[in-house]
């Protein structure tokens, strides 16, 4: 007995749907490429990275800029992730805030000082969460507030997690933006020390009268975050040792949890 077979013809997607999927895929490729280059990219660099014609990239980038998923840096730093995409990212990363909250609260209980959680965004540290300290004289920042990288404990901690070229590019961009005259050699040595100790310091460098200690870590999507403890400089000397010890213990415990 012979067997007969009937070949089923699978339905094909309409051309419009196929083209739409292709556009979304290409836009996603652009966003991923820009995400990897934290200092910004030119249209030509993006085109080379994702192997598309520059004209195609230009059309897609323009559309993404209209939706504020991408922005063009005003100082010639190239194309970067935009505020709308960052806002969506913050919402998606609520889990990081949620998981870090107990550590912030524990650090505040142990030190009595304000504890902050921030994330590296472009050339800024953006505050995601904060547990205020109990002292009358304390440091308070607003959620969403931005801080520079090279003069803050949380910013320096994140820079120390990057390779030297990426850290140098971000530092030079920041110094150029603020008209600061300084040398990479000095910061480079600081970052090496932070890499060894896992702890970064700000001793009145960003704001006179306020010092800070912090550490950086990566979340599951390789985004750099930092937990830091700002302290009024008037009591920094007496508190720094216990704060550093508490931060180091919190870092070990948090990294262990994030690996699960």
Image (cartoon, grey):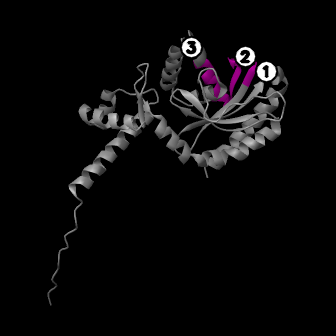
Q: How many residues crowd mark 1 within 10 Å: few (<14), some (14–19), many (20+)? A: some
- 202 magenta-colored: yes
Task: Check disc 3 and report the residue beneath it.
Answer: 185
Q: Secondary structure at mark 1?
A: helix
Q: CA distance from mark 1 to mark 2?
A: 8 Å
Is any part of residue 256 visible from this angle? no
Residue 231 in the image, given as x and y percentages of width and height = 77, 26
| Quarter of the image that includes the N terminus | bottom left
Q: In the rendered structure, are the residues bearing label 1 and label 2 in contact, judged by CB atoms less than 8 Å apart?
A: yes
Q: Which residue is at a point 69% across and 39% down the rendered structure image?
A: 251
Q: Which residues are magenta?
A: 188-211
Residue 254 location in percent, x, y? 67, 44
- Number of numbered discs visible in the structure rendering: 3
Q: CA distance from mark 3 to mark 1?
A: 26 Å
Q: Which residue is mark 1?
A: 233
- The residue under label 2 is 208
Q: Secondary structure at mark 2?
A: loop
Q: Is residue 89 left or right of residue 248?
A: left
Query: SS at mark 3?
Result: helix
- Which numbered disc, 3 or 1, marks the residue that appears first in the sequence? 3
> In front: 52, or 126?
126
Whichever of labels 2 and 3 marks the residue nearer the N terminus, that label is 3
Residue 173 place in picture, x, y as percent: 49, 19
The residue at the far front in this view is 66
- Front residue of this view, candidates 56 and 29: 56
Query: Which of marks 2 and 1 precedes in the sequence?
Result: 2
In the picture as drawn, the residue positioned furthest to the bottom comes out as 1
């Amino acid at each position: 007995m012979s067997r007969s077979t009937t070949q089923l013809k699978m339905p094909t997607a309409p051309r419009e749907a196929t083209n739409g999927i292709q556009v979304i895929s290409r836009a996603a490729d652009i966003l991923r490429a820009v995400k990897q280059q934290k200092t910004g990219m030119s249209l030509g660099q993006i085109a080379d990275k994702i192997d598309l014609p520059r004209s195609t990239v230009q059309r897609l980038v323009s559309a993404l800029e209209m939706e504020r998923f991408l922005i063009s840096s005003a100082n010639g730093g190239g194309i970067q992730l935009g505020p709308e995409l960052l806002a969506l990212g913050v919402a998606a990363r609520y889990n990081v805030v949620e998981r870090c909250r107990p550590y912030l609260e524990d650090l505040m209980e142990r030190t009595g000082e304000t504890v902050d959680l921030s994330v590296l965004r472009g050339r800024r540290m953006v505050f995601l969460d904060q547990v205020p300290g109990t002292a009358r004289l304390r440091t308070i920042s607003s959620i969403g507030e931005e801080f520079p990288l090279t003069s803050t404990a949380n910013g320096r901690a994140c820079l120390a997690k990057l390779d030297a070229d990426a850290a140098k590019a971000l530092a030079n961009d920041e110094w150029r933006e603020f008209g600061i005259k300084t040398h990479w050699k000095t910061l480079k040595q600081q970052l090496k020390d932070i890499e060894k100790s896992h702890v970064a310091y700000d001793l009145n460098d960003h704001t006179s009268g306020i010092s800070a200690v912090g550490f950086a870590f990566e979340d599951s999507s390789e985004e750099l975050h930092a937990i830091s403890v700002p302290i009024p400089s008037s009591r920094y000397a007496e508190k720094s040792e216990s704060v550093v010890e508490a931060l180091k213990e919190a870092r070990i415990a948090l990294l262990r949890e994030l690996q699960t």
